[in-house]
Image (cartoon, coloured by chain):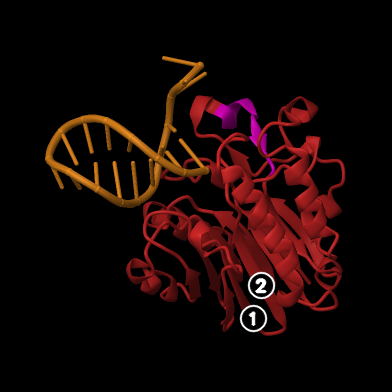
Chain colours: A red, B orange
Amino acid sequence: MRIATWNVNGLRARLDFIKLWLDARAPDVVGMQEVKVAEEEFPFDEFRELGYEVAIHSQKGWNGVGILSKHPVRVVGKGLPGQDEMGARLITAELEDLSFTTVYVPNGKALDHDDFPGKLAWLDSMASHWPSIAAPDQQAILCGDFNVVPEPIDSWRGEKADGRIFHTTEERRRMAALTQTGLVDLFRDRYPEEQRFSWWDYRGGAFHRGQGLRIDFVLGTPAVAARVREVTIDRDFRKKQDGLTASDHAPVIVDLD
DNA sequence: ATGTCGGAATTATTCCGA
């Protein structure tokens, strides 16, 4: 079973690019973030024609998450308690025996911006709500764009970025709280020493300069971690394809036995 | 190089968010 997470940065603008990627990688399940499209304008048929069921929690213009699945999906949750004003950022579905949640964590904008404490509160809500989404002994996945760099190795600036937004102790402590509920960062578990990024700023030639961050994760319960065959950050699809512009995030792919 | 994108508001340009 091939699972992926991908911040597509605008599903309508990315549609042809996404189709190229689906054709090339043939994932079974994809968690998408920043679809940026109202639910009534979502191109469901484009994906159904490719054999994917679609589940979304979205809104006009900004944010929005969705799940593509070749297996039947049952939506069991959208959003976090008390966090609706932060936008459409979480959806949970059940696929056969797997609980699959994808999230788009608030960016926070800047340390002195009102959105930063909102980001921390959202992460607190995520961690406290997670046990009601999935039990520790269950097959469950929590994937998405977390907008947090967990460790210095996950930033192109290394320790020099400590304390900047995405790299603060407050954000890192909350990511750690999430993994301490029993979730495993599947990439880091498989590759303890590798520096691999999942996001590069569009500006300043950051991609070609190697100036990236690893902020997109597939977290899994131990029952899922035991099934991992491979974890790949699909860097090729951060590049232009057939003249089509890429998202600023690369997909992260996990192959399970 | 504060250097690029996507989308909204509003009508080809400016603003916002990332």
**A9 inside magenta stretch:** no
Locate residue A238: give its quadrant.
Answer: top right
Q: Nearer the viewer, residue A16 or A151?
A: A151
Alpha carbon of mark 1 to alpha carbon of mark 2: how far?
6 Å
**A208 inside magenta stretch:** yes
- Seen at 67% across and 39% down, the residue is A166
Whether residue A87 is visible: no
Circle on res. A94: 1
Q: Are marks 1 and 2 on the same chain?
A: yes
Chain containing mark 1:
A
- Seen at 81% across and 69% down, the residue is A221
Relative horizontal placement of residue A175, taking residue A57 as reference (left or right): right
Task: Point out the image quarter for the C terminus of chain A.
Answer: bottom right
Residue type at the position of mark 2: Phe
Q: Position of residue A13 (x, y in %)?
A: 37, 51
Per the image, label 1 sits on a secondary structure element best described as: strand
Tell me which segment is drawn in magenta.
Answer: A206-214
Relative horizontal placement of residue A70, taking residue A186 as reference (left or right): left
Q: Position of residue A210 (x, y in %)?
A: 65, 29
Per the image, label 2 sits on a secondary structure element best described as: strand
Whether residue A184 is visible: yes
Judging by the rendered image, the residue that carries numbered circle 2 is: A100
Residue type at the position of mark 1: Glu
> Looking at the picture, does residue B1 appear above or below residue A147?
above
Q: Position of residue B11 (x, y in %)?
A: 12, 40
Locate residue B4: give its quadrant.
Answer: top left
Please give the count of numbered marks on the rendered protein: 2
- Are the two marked residues, 1 and 2, in contact with CB atoms closer than 8 angstroms? yes
